[in-house]
Image (spheres, rainbow, N blue to C red):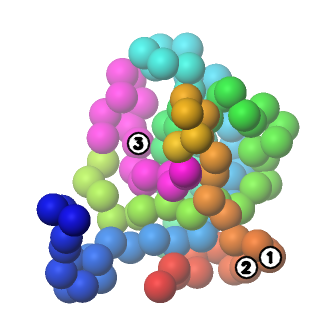
Amino acid sequence: MDNTIAFEDFTKVDIRVGTIIEVNDFPEARNPAYQLTIDFGDLGIKNSSAQITTLYTKADLLNKQILAVVNFSKKQIGKFMSECLVLGAVDGKDVVLLNPETRVENGAQVN
């Protein structure tokens, strides 16, 4: 594997559990996407854009717990500021969200 990283590099990535509390269409996005508002407990509320419209409706996503990287720098997408990266597995053109098997506290760290 050519892109091996040191364990110390991995420990810099802060992956947390959050609950999606608001979902909006994102018509300005180049590819179909939603604007998500996610509650990370003590870490606060963060926004993210996610291209997950093929498998998920807005109703499916509301109150769903997800995993996200919360320590990336913010990214401007059109007029929207994305503050975290929601994690998913790519299956062809679809993205399947990663989430805890059972409900856990918002902000719980993934190790």
In the rendered image, which residue does mark 1 sit on? 102
Quick one: SS at disc 1? loop
**Of tags 1 and 2, which is closer to the observer?**
1
Q: Residue furthest right?
A: 59
**Label pair 2/3, CB-CB below 8 angstroms:** no
Q: Residue at x 84, y 37 (%)?
A: 59
Disc count in the image?
3
Between 100 and 72, the one lying in front of the other is: 100
Q: Position of residue 25 (x, y in %)?
A: 64, 23
The boundaries of the magenta stretch are: 75-89
**Does 46 appear above or below 93?**
below
* Quadrant assignment, res 79: top left
Horizontally, residue 109 falls left or right of residue 53, namely left
* Quadrant assignment, res 1: bottom left
Marking on residue 110: none
Q: Amino acid at mark 1?
A: Thr
Quick one: SS at disc 3? strand
Marking on residue 104: 2
**Label pair 1/2, CB-CB below 8 angstroms:** yes
In the rendered image, which residue does mark 3 sit on? 82
Horizontally, residue 61 falls left or right of residue 17, namely right
Horizontally, residue 14 falls left or right of residue 60, namely left
Q: Position of residue 11 (x, y in %)?
A: 29, 82
Q: CA distance from mark 1 to mark 3?
A: 26 Å
Q: Amino acid at mark 2?
A: Val
